[in-house]
Amino acid sequence: MESPHEHPQEDPPDLETVPPDWSNRPDAPAAPPPTPPSPPRRLPKRLAAALVLATMTVGAFGGYTIARSRQSNATSVGTTSAASVTPSTNAAGASVTLSLAQIQAAVDPALVDVTATLGGSGTAKGTGMVISSTGEILTNNHVISGATSISVQIAGTGATYHANLVGYDVTEDVAVLQIPNVSGLTTIKAASASTVSANDAVLAIGNALGQGGTPVAAQGIVTAVNQTITASDDTGSAQETLNGLIEISAAVQPGDSGGATVNKYGQVIGMTTAAASSGFRPMSTASTATTTTAYAIPIDAALSIARQIESGTASATVHIGEHGLLGVQVASATGYGSVSGSGAPVVGVQANSAAAAAGIVAGAVIVSIDGHTINSATDLNTAMATTHPGDKVTVGWQDSSGQSHTATVTLRTGAA
């Protein structure tokens, strides 16, 4: 893919060197001994993706590839704590800037690695943020999309728990999970997006590449606010538009979705949700460098939706409880030879799912749900978004030879 920039961009400055100085202030807390720098982190130019049952989300906007940062692993079929750092004010009431290590010490204990089991199609991994001491977790909807079960691990190294899906908003890409029967968890400290300006230093902290362990921080700066992007999966299907986003220059990687975008005071300003990657090949070498633009949902907007979900108040966009799972992985009709020229082509079916019970197989094209025409994977997402496990729906599809079929199926448990 061609770079959207005429010239390579320089790497964003380290947090400790972004004005104002992060560490050489008389009111700054003492920083721990320095650690050797990590190798540069790069975002792959192409990512696997999905909003329904695929394994991540990728799309195009303004010359960029907008990638949902959920790490997937497709297959054939109490809490730890860290030394507390107070990222608020000094004795004089002034805000205190922190070093990179101090920020991670404050934020890491309030992060979780999220693993979504996708039935027979494997697992997907992302990040979540603890928003209540009794185990409520904020994450992206696309992180847990299509899950038959969800687990979370505190700070990537602590206790692992089963998590229930409280609800989600597909339109805003927000979901809330609940760890049952826990207390005393460390929570994030949030700052309103109204405090965010271009050139602010930031960290994007999360479960990079879904590898687990101590959360990884990608350094960068805010490059714009109030941005709009259109995100979709790798085939251009399941498109949705997200508004009001914070744009940052940081090497966000698959698995970082749902993680924390943090300011220089250790406060969470956003939830990392998508990234755009563009490569260029220097004239004098055979190597390829990559620049990355990432996007975060402002944390106050995400928390507002979370509060609605917690209250149990459903709406046209907010779904309370688990999603009824049909059990298909679908793609854009473009390039997949849809028999009718429309519909949602099926590229995979989960074992023991409602779709499998109906006889739907890869190569079929879903053309209707409850009599409503399905023209794309996005239409299928919309039709299924308000369903619950146990609901009955009538599915219309064409098989690979063009023959039409219908069946009424009972939806099974699925996170989204």
Image (cartoon, rainbow, N blue to C red):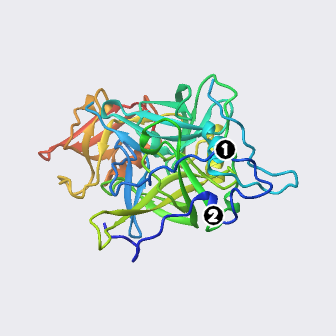
CA separation, marks 2 and 1? 19 Å
Quick one: 404 or 385, which is closer to the camera?
385
Residue at 29% x, 68% y is 285
Q: Is residue 209 visible to us here?
A: yes
x%, y% of residue 3? 36, 70
> Which residue was labeled with disc 2?
18
Examine the image and state in which quarter residue 408 appears. Answer: top left
Which amino acid does the dot numbered 2 rest on?
Val
Examine the image and state in which quarter residue 348 appears. Answer: top left
Classed neighbour count for the residue bearing mark 2: other residues with Cα under 10 Å, few (<14), some (14–19), many (≥20): some
> Which residue was labeled with disc 1?
32
Quick one: 290 or 23, which is closer to the camera?
23
Which amino acid does the dot numbered 1 rest on?
Pro
Q: Is residue 185 left or right of residue 157?
A: right
Q: Is residue 246 visible to us here?
A: no
Classed neighbour count for the residue bearing mark 1: other residues with Cα under 10 Å, few (<14), some (14–19), many (≥20): few
Q: Is residue 392 left or right of residue 188?
A: left
The C terminus appears in which quarter of the rendering? Answer: top left
For label 2, the SS is loop
